[in-house]
Amino acid sequence: MNYFLEKIVYKFKSFMEKIQIYKVKNGYINEQKLIQLVYQKPFLLYYIKPVDNAKVINAALRKDKYALQFAAMKIRNDKDFMLKHKNLGFGCMMYLGPALRDNKSVVMATVAEQLKKEKKDYIGSFSEFCDALKNLGPKLSDDKELFLTVANSKKNTGCLPFVSPTLKKDREFILKLLEVNGIDLKNVSEELAGDKEIVLAAVGSYGKALKYASEDLRGDDDVILRAISSSESIADRLKILKFAIISREKFLYLSNLITDNKLEDESLSIMPRFDDRQDIANSNTYGFDNMYLSSSGRSR
């Protein structure tokens, strides 16, 4: 009996919702009623987009930060309106109108709010990061300060795809960017992936970036140890070690240091010498080709 009752209630609610949608689409609802409705059901804006009524958008934003996508360009180009909602962080930045996409004060304000939210363990979508940077104007895509600030975001999945062609060739900028967050090593050229200074900067801030380094540097002691030392977690250190191209003996030696929590300078200074090349060549005997040599990295 309860099942049939629930079904009737569901159908009634669906019917009433369709009536609301019809009234909204055809303009049979006054502004005050519309504000009340979109506050409860922001999705109703979909049926009347683009919305040029700031009060209606404000009401919807109280429930759904993505309601900005339904705002008319007049509202999204309004500096005061967008700054009022800078607390949305990347959620605001990704919907900036053309007139504000190169406005540094607005963009930096939204980035600052985003970083504040992340300090409070704010959880959001990683896609917001990409969508926000895709929405930047050509002038700001060449702004070093902006990207070095954005790189601090916990949502950072890589800034380099969104910077200008000029910055992509700026070695000094890339070095500073990788010092903030090494995840962008996956987006650098093969030449830079084989540059030891660049790679050391990357793995120092993000140990797992080791998998994006050149083959030679994935077998370099300084690079490997910097990458391992970038994390305090034993589990993470072991994961990072798997990206190294080293001999079986060296892998076991370093694994033991990690698991025994003895990865210290004193231990490394007396690390035995290993014939990496010879052991790697014969690594099939131990099954190390699958475990270490095929670790995901750059195509060979």
Image (tube, helix red, strand yellow):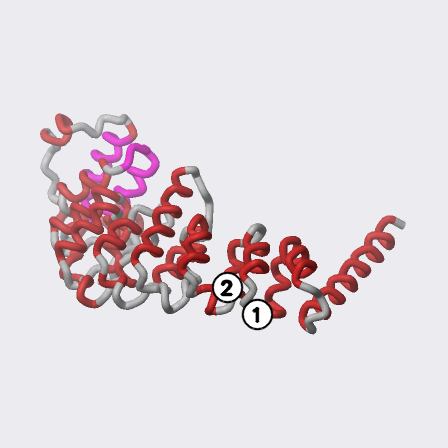
Q: CA distance from mark 2 to mark 1?
A: 9 Å
**What kind of element bears circle 2?**
helix
- The residues colored magenta run 231-258
Q: In terms of secondary structure, what is the magenta stretch mainly?
A: helix
Position in image of residue 267 (x %, y %): 15, 27
Per the image, the residue denoted by label 1 is: 49
- Residue drawn at point x = 19 percent, y = 42 percent: 224
Amino acid type of the residue tagged 2 in the rendering: Gln
Residue 176 appears in the figure: yes
Question: Which of the image's four quarters has the C terminus?
Answer: bottom left
Amino acid type of the residue tagged 1 in the rendering: Lys
Horizontal relation, residue 271 to residue 186: left or right: left
- Among the two numbered marks 2 and 1 on one chain, the one whose residue lies closer to the N terminus: 1
**Figure quadrant of residue 121:** top left
**Figure quadrant of residue 53:** bottom right
Position in image of residue 18 (x %, y %): 74, 66
Position in image of residue 222 (x %, y %): 13, 41
Per the image, the residue denoted by label 2 is: 69
**What kind of element bears circle 1?**
loop
